[in-house]
Amino acid sequence: MKVRFSFLTSLVLALIFSACSNEETPQNSPNSVSGKVVEPVDTSVRAELFEDPHSYSKENAKVTHLNWEASVDFDAKVISATAEWVLSPEHADTVVFDVKDLEIEKVLVDGESSAWSIEGNDELLGSALVIPAGGAQIIGIQYKTSPQAEALQWYPAELTQGKRQPFLFTQSQAILARTWIPCQDRPGVRFTYEATVKVPKETLALMSASNPTQKNEQGIYEFNMPQPIPSYLLALGVGDLAFIPIGDRAGVYAEPEMVRNAAYEFAQTDEMILDAEEMYGPYYWGRYDMLVLPPSFPFGGMENPRLTFLTPTVIVGDQSLVSLIAHELAHSWSGNLVTNATWNDFWINEGFTVYFEMRIMEKLYGVEFANMLEALSYDDLQKELAVMLEENVAATSLKQDLKGKNPDDGVTAIAYDKGFHFLRLCENTVGREKWDEFLKSYFDKYKFKTMVTEVFLQELAGVLTQGQWDSIGVEEWIYGTGLPVNCPFPVSNRFVVVDDAVRMMLSADPQADNVKSMVYLPQETTIRWTTQEWLRYIRGLEAGGASEGHYALADANYGFTGSPNPEIIAAWYSAILKTNFEGYDANMYTEKVESFLGSVGRRKFIVPMYQSMLDGDKKRQEWAKKIYMDSRASYHPLAQGTLDDLFSETME
């Protein structure tokens, strides 16, 4: 039975159905809405649907292939390069590229010098590089990057683990590729690429492409990416790196001092790939290798094809944080294979990826472990929603309108966790077997293409009955704000024990003589707890309004302050920094907070810690400001931007 939508949805879908970039109307999709034959989308509606507000480039003049030759200068913090772009066979007379703070030296059109112009100078979007192309097929752009390029993180040797060679890594998502390569910087444009990169001889260069596994004497490396990717998946890493293979299709790069620990931590990657393929079809990218970056990397991971970038904060020795690997691997289908057409549809990437991540973790570690991850996801969503519903209600919709805004503003629990819970509800409604068949077909049908929410809804119409569509409340989930009341509530049996322990602690009087016997679980219970259970415990204390005495008791027995696990450390300090923290060694406490914030740049960790300090009194706010000023230079520009806003809002 075909879904009978509301009149509004029927009208929208009738207009936009089959508006997938670079492809004709799908042949096997549901072809009726409310009993009416869906007409092919007209040109004006298609253009509006796929119009990208974050790029100057035009739909009528696209690139298809990049040849990139570059030289990396660590002393000047500059990349000197030539980007040679192959254009689509038919294109407009003028081709437009996105650039930001690039020094354009020369432009060649089919090998001949050409006129060019720079138009606009937007703080967020940069400028348009406009080139008359006529019937040309190749445009070459010779240029240099700025030492302040936002996508480039230059790490001095003394801040690396080995302290022998400097380190460089890029972060192109969402619209920062234009700061290191002139490109059509939007997810709706895909291209293949080849590259030749010269780096200092003592370093190894890697890209989101086929990669070498060891250094050569010339310091010149060649790369090939035969699958078409969008610009935000362009990536480069350079440093003193070693490689260890993990199975037949996976391996890890890291500094020599870390690479063995990383290989142990990620040992199950090959098994994850097999599990993922079993569920949702072939892995199309050849190899799945990983690069462990310095701790200033602002994210947990970045799903660059063939070379996932990873934070070192997941290397904790017990493989308890490998859900991050599952997440980045899942992007090989949701995001890299089927990509949001613009950042307004970011949930198409991340909601699907969180769902897929949970399914991989369930296969690998069982239902109970996956239930814990889902419960934490639900907690994260509720916590972020509490703030967003007061400050920016519109941002709680899955379908976003980010025109005039930084697409990084859409990187919230809404895209990730609300998107996941919507898909979980769909699975619960139709049954897992039918849902898996649908998703496997979806990934195959739209591979190497882009997707918008409305086209996905048309696909969803083929798997839901009218009654199921209504019971889910699809339109409310997609276009409504907040969290619908039918959101699945994750239940974890393992968290029942944790929550009981929290209640036991909170109900006790920290000053009582026999309090220790009342609040501590036996070691034979807690010794088996994972990172997820300890996070639940800490969050439970915070949510329950634990006093300084309760925190002191917990720390005395469980040693949170001295934990080597960054997830636990960040959660612990985010909680206790909101208190007066009486009864602790102030020097030890101060030193540990400053050390952590000065050595880790992952936004997930440092932003809540700074926020807790800024929510305190004037003295604590000034302390936070001092730490930030001392540490800011070591943070990635994305983290700097987030924290600059946080401090300006709090201390203005």
Image (cartoon, rainbow, N blue to C red):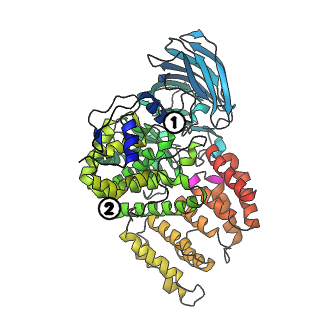
Relative to 505, 587 lies left or right: right
Residue drawn where x is 60% and y is 64% of the image: 574
Closest to the observer, 457 or 508: 457
- Specify whether residue 184 is painted magenta: no
Disc 2: which residue: 367
Q: Is residue 622 above or below residue 101?
A: below
Residue 366 percent across, percent down from the top left: 32, 60
Q: Mark 2 vs mark 1: give the one in front.
A: 1
Q: Is residue 632 above or below residue 558?
A: above
x, y percent for residue 369: 37, 62
Amino acid type, residue under disc 1 in the picture: Tyr
Distance of label 2 from label 1 (alpha carbons): 34 Å
Can the viewer see residue 263?
no
Q: Give the residue number, with chain letter if any, for mark 1.
A: 232
Which residue range is magenta in the image? 598-604
Compared with 130, 331 (above or below) is below
